[in-house]
Amino acid sequence: MGAPLRTLVVDNGAYAIKSGFADNPAEFHTVRNCSVRGKGGRILVADQVQDSSDLSGLIPRVPFEKGYITDWELEKDIWKRLLSHSEKCKPGESTLLITEPYFNLPNIRHAYDEIVFEEFGFAAYHRSTAAALSANLSGPAGPSEAALIVDSGYSFTHVVPVYLGRPIWDAIKRIEVGGKLLTNHLKEIIAFRQWNMMEETFLVNEIKEQCCYVSERFDADLEACRLDGLANTIKLEYVLPDLISGRKGYIRSNAPATSKSADEQVLIMNNERFTVPEILFNPSDIGIEQAGLAEAIYQAVSQTDSDLQPLLYANVLLTGGNARLPGFAKRLQRELRSLVPSEFELRIHASERPETVAWEGGVRWVTERPEDFRSHCVTREEYMENGALPCARKFDSMR
């Protein structure tokens, strides 16, 4: 089939949307996948949310619920805003490569097809899981034969074995812990111990990103939190934003008390810094009766062919926003090494920007293997003539 001039790659995450044309990755954009009603009644959408200087007390409205799109009207508004800023994207002259959730429901898949072609009028498109696109970065010049994608995002954490570019669906493991749960748990802890910040979703999420880390020595760090003064190397003082002056929140260094302003509102972050991310490795800490991340990986790999298992352990790729937490990769390496057979090599790859790995993998597929990519796309003409059948045939072949 004839190829449209340009391909727009969109990683449609539940927390943030990563987008940009494959032929111009420098124009890559990340926007929040939500809207809020501002204090003056104005609705802020996508990039307007993150550009706003005052989001205090505002609760985001999100199109995703438990990992799936449930509010298509809101999602369409966000996509319209996105397309107007993606180098003035002209859908009729563009191909769309977009991600969809794991285990996406049939009616939601059909909604993707209908909206992409009938609402926006793209010339062609392909939808894929984030893991399948991420696997394109598992080798130096393209997808390696086998890779284990650990995708810890907003709604869930998925462990996805991938072989020859396709997920092994029967072996995928899901942990009901993602960035949203961690932020909400931190809100509850802060509200109980210090300040009532239950309605400060944006601020608490920012605090989590700046202050939290994955502990490599949980018991030792817990003991350190009980010490006083400078002996406590865990405690941080986070100065809350000043909405009057426009000053943003920041971590305060251990300055002399005389340099501290009496007007500052300070949040003390102590064991919360590592006990909140610990839920990823021990969900039972908050009553979620599931395996932690290392055990889930072991279970997923164990359900694949025995000849494939050494290849998967030798090529573990971390993706998703939670993988940015300091100490994440080292902790996983240590816990997983104790579970993996000693004769297997264990290599964990952590990108500097794990939240953009799927988008970058999509760009690599489009630019380095264009014929393969085009062969898996459905054109608008095919859709208008045959409905969703070509989409099910071509997209399911990559599932």
Image: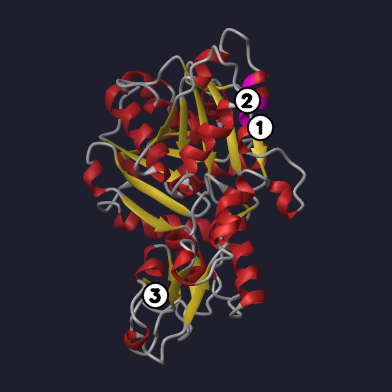
Which residue is the site of mark 3?
A: 249
Which residue is the site of mark 2?
A: 339
As drawn, 128 above or below 162: below
Depth check, mark 1 against mark 2: the one in front is: 2
**In x, y percent, where is residue 233?**
46, 61
- Magenta run includes residue 56: no
Q: Which badge, 3 or 2, comes first in the chain's sequence?
A: 3
Pointer 1 with pointer 2, Cβ within 8 A: yes
Q: Is residue 71 visible?
A: no
- Picture disc at residue 278: none
Q: Is residue 323 visible?
A: yes
Q: Nearer the viewer, residue 116 or 192?
A: 192
Part of the protein shown in magenta: 296-301
Q: Quadrant of the C terminus?
A: top right
In what element is the residue under mark 1? helix
Write the residue at 48% across / 15% down: 164
Question: Cα distance, mark 1 to mark 2?
Answer: 8 Å
